[in-house]
Image (cartoon, rainbow, N blue to C red):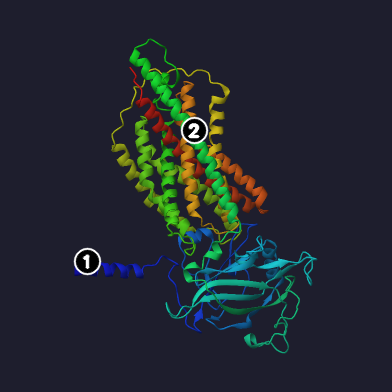
Amino acid sequence: MQRAARLALLAFGAADAFYLPGVAPREYAAGEKVELKVNKLTSTKTQLPYEYYALPFCRPAEVVVVAENLGEVLRGDRIMNSNYELKMGVEESCKILCRKQLTSKESAAFALRIEQDYRVHWVMDNLPSATKYIDETNPAKPVTIYDLGFPLGFRGSEGIPGTAAGTSYLNNHLLLTIKFHKDESSFQGSRIVGFEVEPSSIKHSYTGEWKGAETKLSTCGGGSSAPLAMKGDVDAIFTYDVKWEFSDIKWASRWDTYLLMGDEQIHWFSIVNSLMIVLFLSGMVAMIMMRTLHRDFNRYNAIEAAEEVEEETGWKLVHGDVFRPPQNPMMLSVLVGTGVQTTSMAVITMVFAVLGFLSPANRGGLMTAMLLLFVFMGVPAGYASAFLHKSLKGADWRKNIVLTATFFPGVVFSIFFVLNFFVWGEQSSGAVPFGTMFALLVMWFGISMPLVFLGSYFGYRRKNLDLPVRVNQIPRQVPEQVWYMRPAFSITVGGVLPFGAVFIELFFILSSIWLHQFYYVFGFLLLVFVILVITCAEITMVMCYFQLCAEDYHWWWRAFLTSGSSAGYMFAYSAFYFFTKLEMTKLTSVLLYFGYMFIGALVFFVLTGTIGFYSCYWFVWKIFSAIKVD
């Protein structure tokens, strides 16, 4: 009994000491130094991130790069130290950071990035900097919303006093508002729960000699002053204010403001609307299928029982050919194996995200998790591909294993590698270093490929299933099909419903990726994924049933392509989103967008295609197992 109590105490102690990355709170004593780290510059117009010191900002004597995970590197994060001096609870007013004599080339670099709508991203106590604005859509209940980062500067216009139209102005003075929470009954010190930045542009002036940080600026104190134009040689003085505000927000809830969506009601309504439509259609389809199949079973088995000499009709007619291996079974098994790999990765990632393991506080965690899971899901990929290839009497098992391990990752890596050259040419921090590229290759060939081989070993070792009906030696001729039952039309129509189940959620996902917003409604995403699986399964089974009734037994590839065709609609929607929501002008940015969306469409293709294929396989197996055939 005492031993059990001791073990329980140890378990509680371990649980109390265990924190997810980025989740452990830190308390600051009064006057203790609070480190402000700089991250990167981003723009929705170019989609090319740059490290903070790529522009001639004030640099510390020694720039220290914070260690990053794989996901952060792929996202273009470059977190470094800064020379901003902040102390808990100590307010500052118009403190001088540094003075920079910008050459015309340096000011032109600032002007270009301002024109491209770049935003600056900082990090403090693992919280990203944000600009606050009030959403007054409902005047009775205004909502505070954070916009990630803060603008590098602004473009002058006739509506802004003291500015010239078309001229870029740098935000060289920043008001840092840091919110903290204290609770003496629970912990000692203060915890940071908010980090707001309010930028402004001031052409500072001073009297007398320049004395560094001791210089008295005549432009401080709230008086009106001209903004700092980025034109020709510029004398830029960077300053900042520090303001500390007590907040009732607890440390555990500090991310809520960042994750708050301004269009929450639209999001809810859209999801519920999509859910109701798809569930209604699914119910209708299921009811029709059950009633029609039930009638078919009764008719076929009644004929057998009465021993009537009657010509067979409908789907029973193709019982001798329905399990005949398709053309190119090698590629079908490879795609199905890859689909099992991506589906397993997606399901496990979403489960972890729903449980809160992939917190936005852990930057790059989501991408790192997806990459690692894809690598480790090589075992089910190899198993599924090998067993299907063996079932379809495929030849050359070695080729099947190698293609399963290399075909899909090879296509994705090739596109990624080519796009990376374009990003590298732009000198962006989004360019993946060759060291990281080598690490990805090691993960692929050193971990993923051996795991595919392991899965394939068990797949080929497994005994083939006994088919419910015999396969005739001579293939039956497929009669001429009506226009709406031909492959091109039925495959195109089959993808509409699965895409309809996800396109609303797809809008929010695209906005989070390309408009740099947080996406943290993984519960909704998991629900939509379940709807997608049901829809893919049912539409494929219905189309397969109609195809077999038309005496066309070539269902293997069509089952995969029917639901997989929804990827074509997804790519078309991404093009629509590009022209209606984004303002990209650079060729590299356009290539990046369509290149990555093509990769996304490929993943969606193998994922939905595999769901449709296995659903149809199960359906055909079940209906031909339920009838008596001589």
Judge whether 540 appears above or below 136 on screen: above
Judge whether 86 appears above or below 577 on screen: below
- The answer to whether 277 appears left or right of 101 in the picture is left
State the residue lying farthest toward the bottom.
208
Residue that mark 1 sits on: 4
In the picture, the disc for residue 393 is none
Per the image, label 1 sits on a secondary structure element best described as helix
Q: Position of residue 163 (x, y in %)?
A: 78, 70
**Figure quadrant of the C terminus:** top left
Quarter residue 624 falls in: top left
Judge whether 246 appears above or below 116 on screen: below
* Residue drawn at point x = 48 percent, y = 59 percent: 71
Quarter residue 122 falls in: bottom right
* Residue drawn at point x = 67 percent, y = 48 percent: 579
* Residue drawn at point x = 59 percent, y = 50 percent: 593
**Figure quadrant of the N terminus:** bottom left
User: Disc 2 versus disc 1: distance between alpha carbons?
Assistant: 55 Å
Give the mark nearest the N terminus, 2 or 1: 1
* Residue 472 in view of the camera: no
Q: Position of residue 178 (x, y in %)?
A: 56, 75
Mark 2: amino acid: Val
Per the image, label 2 sits on a secondary structure element best described as helix
State the residue lying farthest toward the top.
309
Q: Position of residue 404 (x, y in %)?
A: 41, 41
Residue that mark 2 sits on: 285
**In front here: 550 or 414?**
550
Quarter residue 298 falls in: top left
Q: Residues within 10 Å of mark 2 (few under 14, many from 20)?
A: some
Q: Position of residue 287 (x, y in %)?
A: 47, 32
Q: Residues within 10 Å of mark 1 (few under 14, many from 20)?
A: few
* Residue 218 in view of the camera: yes
